[in-house]
């Protein structure tokens, strides 16, 4: 406990007040003597101490880890800003859409952040809704606190310290050149062309990919990565959910998946593949082969256990599972993997991400691994973090959400690449020429590589031309895609 106080003082960190909550217990067990008089059991005493640090703060509090939103908050990113009372554990909260680092910045720039995952179960932020933030600091946990009034400077200092503690360095120019390329992804184009509910999952075929790339070439856009999104795989029991854990191409859509990857290469693009590793269904190929992979059901809402998918069991042998799947596609030409659906408890997701990343890098360090959890503790186990798509729906303040998603990604994943996700957004029914162009304009000058998903000719010639200008400016420029927020 003294060490924690010394650390806080050493870092020049102001503490408004501190108290200690002692949670101790003594457990007595039966003591038996053996025939030779040795004790076969003993009395055990266990204790734990949770220190309470209190800070005077001003609302709203920016909580980048809090990506859980209600319908009325869905557009503006308001769920990251808290003025009402709350108690959060940023390590066990669900990642939801995209959940950032376990830190808080108040309206005056006061900064506080957790520094270790040790004791994460009892590491919490609690705000009284007025002016007091209480941080529970269990033994083994440490805090980084700065009350200088410059939240960004404090956050950068925190990132620098955490990068040293977690033993990772920023990506440098020795990364493969294709990592910095622009990217194209089939997802929103699938949704645009779908004429029925969930029809987009069945539209992705070899010919779909060929036609998509032919349009990119016809536009005269720069070549880059080409990622096949959700819909390339099999659905064993006919439901979309059964695809989670069945990472085998649908032979009706892709008679020869290696030929499709070869076609992407021949047209001058780098093959990429969407895989939602964190979810698994009981009817999937992997669940039948490795039933230990089946983890918990989602924690909220109604669950039909006969049909719903589950979370991957973080205690199972994920390394072996990931190695098997990733290598299967790597050997036919896939160089980039887009990992999706990391919406479970963050402490579980951290272990899963680590094993997925280790598996890929053991196969080939040049594989690009992309995730959507921009958290300093996840950053070591990722190459690229995406800003995660936004629906350009006028029911919500979508421009604010675009800005917040970018800020959380940029500041929580220092030294790693940023994928500026889905120009035009994800809600094909809401996209217009004006909103497409406004969204694109917001991305100009940002660090990160651009990603085109829906083809811009659907929204007019201006969108085709403006997108091309943006892509070429990036492609011919410095290609700054690595977060320098440290």
Image (cartoon, rainbow, N blue to C red):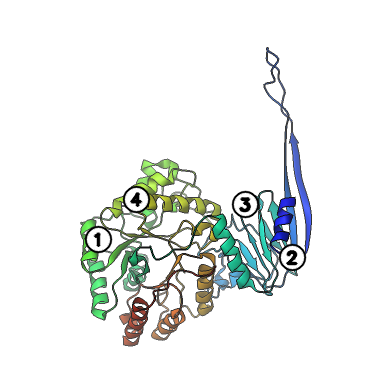
The image's mark for residue 261 is 1
Disc 4 marks which residue?
363
Q: CA distance from mark 1 to mark 2?
A: 56 Å
SS of the residue at dot 2?
Answer: loop
The residue carrying mark 3 is 120
Q: Which residue is mark 2?
A: 14
Whole-angstrom CA distance, mark 1 to mark 4, is 18 Å
Residue 107, quarter of picture: bottom right
Percent x, y of residue 35 = 68, 12
- Residue sitting at x 32%, y 67%: 225
Q: What's the CA distance linking mark 3 and mark 2?
A: 23 Å
Choose between 439 and 331: the one closer to the eye: 331
Earlier-in-chain disc, 3 versus 2: 2
Give the CA distance from mark 3 to mark 1. Answer: 43 Å
Eye-nearest disc, 1 or 4: 4
Question: Mark 4 vs mark 2: which is more N-terminal?
Answer: 2
Q: Nearer the viewer, residue 390 or 408?
A: 408
Residue at horizontal 69 percent and vertical 18 percent from the top: 38
């Amino acid at each position: 406990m003294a060490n924690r106080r010394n650390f806080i003082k050493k870092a020049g960190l102001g503490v408004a007040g501190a108290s200690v909550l002692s949670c101790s217990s003594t457990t007595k067990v039966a003591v038996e003597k053996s025939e030779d008089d040795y004790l076969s059991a003993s009395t055990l005493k266990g204790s734990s101490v949770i220190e309470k640090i209190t800070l005077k703060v001003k609302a709203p509090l920016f909580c980048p880890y809090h990506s859980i939103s209600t319908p009325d908050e869905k557009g503006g990113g308001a769920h990251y800003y808290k003025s009402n009372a709350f108690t959060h554990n940023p390590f066990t909260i669900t990642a939801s859409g995209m959940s950032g680092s376990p830190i808080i910045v108040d309206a005056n720039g006061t900064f506080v952040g957790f520094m270790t995952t040790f004791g994460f179960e009892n590491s919490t932020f609690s705000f009284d809704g007025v002016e007091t933030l209480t941080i529970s600091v269990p033994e083994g946990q440490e805090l980084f606190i700065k009350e200088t009034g410059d939240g960004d400077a404090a956050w950068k200092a925190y990132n620098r310290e955490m990068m040293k503690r977690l033993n990772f360095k920023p990506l440098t120019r020795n990364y493969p050149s294709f990592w910095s390329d622009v990217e194209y992804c089939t997802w929103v184009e699938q949704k645009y062309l779908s004429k029925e509910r969930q029809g987009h999952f069945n539209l992705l075929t070899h010919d779909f990919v060929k036609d998509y790339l032919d349009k990119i070439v016809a536009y005269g856009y720069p070549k880059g990565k080409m990622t096949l999104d959700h819909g390339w795989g099999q659905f064993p029991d006919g439901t979309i959910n059964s695809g989670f854990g069945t990472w085998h191409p649908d032979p009706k859509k892709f008679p020869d998946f290696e030929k499709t990857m070869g076609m992407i290469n021949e047209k001058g693009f780098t093959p990429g593949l969407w895989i939602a590793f964190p979810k698994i269904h009981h009817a999937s190929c992997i669940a039948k082969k490795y039933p230990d992979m089946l983890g918990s059901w989602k924690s909220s809402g109604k669950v039909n256990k006969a049909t719903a998918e589950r979370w991957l069991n973080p205690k199972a042998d994920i390394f072996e599972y990931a190695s098997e799947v990733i290598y299967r596609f790597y050997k036919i030409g896939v160089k980039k993997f887009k990992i999706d659906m990391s919406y479970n408890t963050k402490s579980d997701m951290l272990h899963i991400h680590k094993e997925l990343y280790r598996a890929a890098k053991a196969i080939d360090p040049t594989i690009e691994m992309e995730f959507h959890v921009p958290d300093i503790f996840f950053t070591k186990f990722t190459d690229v973090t995406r800003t995660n798509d936004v629906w350009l729906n006028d029911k919500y303040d979508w421009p604010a959400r675009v800005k917040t998603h970018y800020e959380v990604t940029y500041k929580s994943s220092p030294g790693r690449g940023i994928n500026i996700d889905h120009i035009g957004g994800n809600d094909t029914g809401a996209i217009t020429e004006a909103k497409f162009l406004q969204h694109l304009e917001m991305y100009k000058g940002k660090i990160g590589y651009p990603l085109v998903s829906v083809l811009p000719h659907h929204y007019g010639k201006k969108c085709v031309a403006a997108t091309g200008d943006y892509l070429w400016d990036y492609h011919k420029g410095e290609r700054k895609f690595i977060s320098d927020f440290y």
